[in-house]
């Protein structure tokens, strides 16, 4: 009321009402965006998708995303860097799988490529570490079965056949 200098006897046109409702939707979308970001960091594409799923119109979702960027709560490059860092530390993946995951989060290709270039990813080393951990639980199996299962395990994490073959040769 104060922002628009409204009082009890103010008459509003249909256009004024529509504008006030649109502004209200934007404020609700901003609140929803803050709640989503407070839960965990988000990429802009992911946040937009979540807001649309909650029923906010595209204009309100876009305004909320712009507000989050203005406040410094939303930065796709930082999100991509942290995502890659976290994945490499806790659940290593191949470059291809990291790229796919970040695309699903709504990060653009240039940002993904820049983030991957900044991070040193040793696919062979990571795959070898994963395979050694997994192989320790497969010692009862014959070699072809163990290799087949390890190959599938590494393949599901996005490692290519060339890396998998080297890892299996190394493990024996």
Image: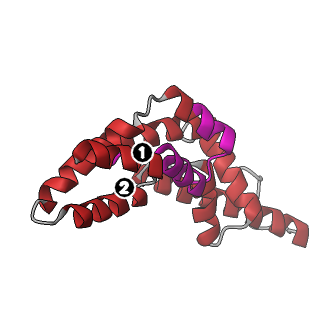
Image spot of residue 136 (x, y percent): 13, 54
Disc 2 element: helix
**Residue extending farthest left:** 140
- Residue 154: which disc? 2
What segment is highlighted magenta in the picture?
Answer: 90-114
x, y percent for residue 7: 75, 61
Q: Main secondary structure of the magenta part?
A: helix
Q: Are marks 1 and 2 in contact (CB under 8 Å)?
A: yes
Q: Name the residue under label 1.
A: 163
In this rendered view, identify the residue nearer to me: 90 or 51: 90
* Residue 9 location (% of width, % of height): 80, 67
**Of residues 121 and 37, the one drawn nearer to the viewer in this rendering:** 121
Which structural element holds mark 1?
Answer: helix
Q: Considering depth in this image, is 152 or 42 the residue closer to the camera?
A: 152
Left/right placement of residue 159 relative to residue 171 reads right
Q: Tell me if residue 107 is in the magenta stretch.
A: yes
Residue 116: mark: none
């Amino acid at each position: 009321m104060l922002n628009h200098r409204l009082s009890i006897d103010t008459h509003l046109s249909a256009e004024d009402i529509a504008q006030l409702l649109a502004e209200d939707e934007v404020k609700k979308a901003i609140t929803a965006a803050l709640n989503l970001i407070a839960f965990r960091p988000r990429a802009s594409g992911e946040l937009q998708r979540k807001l649309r799923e909650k029923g906010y119109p595209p204009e309100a979702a876009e305004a909320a995303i712009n507000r989050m960027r203005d406040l410094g709560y939303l930065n796709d490059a930082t999100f991509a860097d942290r995502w890659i860092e976290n994945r490499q530390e806790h659940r290593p993946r191949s470059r291809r799988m990291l790229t796919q995951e970040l695309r699903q989060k709504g990060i653009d290709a240039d940002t993904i490529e820049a983030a991957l270039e900044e991070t040193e990813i040793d696919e062979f080393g990571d795959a070898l570490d994963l395979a050694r951990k997994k192989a320790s639980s497969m010692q009862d199996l014959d070699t072809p079965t163990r290799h087949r299962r390890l190959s599938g395990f590494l393949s599901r994490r996005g490692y290519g056949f060339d890396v998998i073959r080297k890892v299996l040769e190394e493990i024996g």
